[in-house]
Image (cartoon, rainbow, N blue to C red):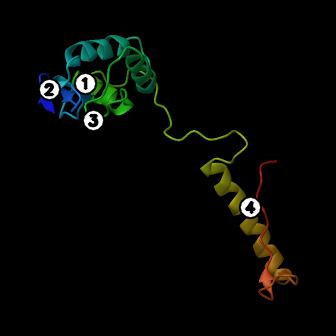
Amino acid sequence: MILDRGEHDLVKVRIVWRGGAVTEIEVKVRVNSVENLTQGVEMRERVLELARTKLHDDEIAAILTGEGHRSPKCPDGVLPITVQRIRFQAGLKGLTEQRTRWRHSPDLLSAQELAGRIEHSRELAVRSDQAGPSFDRSSPFGRAPVLQHVARD
C-alpha cells in the first residue's frame, strides 16, 4: 500500500494486491480551514458572490455542494456554518433578513401561544379548584388529577 499526500485535503492510496492487480483511490481528509482545501480560494469567491445576491447560508451551501465543493471537516458537502464563517470574515453581515432557527408545523402552537393558553388554563384551574378538585376515578393510580389537553382552535 502506498500513500501519497499530494494536496492538503486529498490522500491518494494505491494498493498492489498479491496477484498483481492495482487499486487506486482518493480519500478526502479533514483540514483546519477553507484555505487548506484544494478548491478553497474558488469556493470562498463563490460564497461571497452568492452572498451578495442575498441568498441564505443553507441555500448557498446547497449550491456549492452541487458544484462539487466541500467544507474543511465534511467530505460530503458544504455546511451552512462554513458559508456563515466565510461571510463574517469578509464583513458581509446582515445581507438577508433574520431567519428563525426552528421551523415548526403551522398546526402546532408557538411558545407565546402556548404560554397564553397555559395562563388561560391556569385561570380556569384556579376557578375550578375553588369549586373542588376534579379526579379521574378510573386511573390505576387511584385519585389522579384530570389533565386537560391544550390544542389549537
Type of amino acid under label 2: His
Mark 3 sits on what residue?
73
Mark 2 sits on what residue?
8
Mark 4 vs mark 1: which is more N-terminal?
A: 1
Mark 2 vs mark 4: which is more N-terminal?
A: 2
Mark 2 vs mark 3: which is more N-terminal?
A: 2
Type of amino acid under label 4: His
Task: Locate the N terminus by quadrant.
Answer: top left
Extreme residue toward the bottom, this view: 142
Q: Nearer the viewer, mark 1 or mark 2?
A: 1
Mark 1 vs mark 3: which is more N-terminal?
A: 1
Type of amino acid under label 1: Ala
Q: Is residue 43 left or right of residue 64?
A: left
Mark 1 sits on what residue?
21
Q: Is residue 45 left or right of residue 146?
A: left
Q: Nearer the viewer, mark 1 or mark 3?
A: 1
Mark 4 sits on what residue?
120
Type of amino acid under label 3: Lys
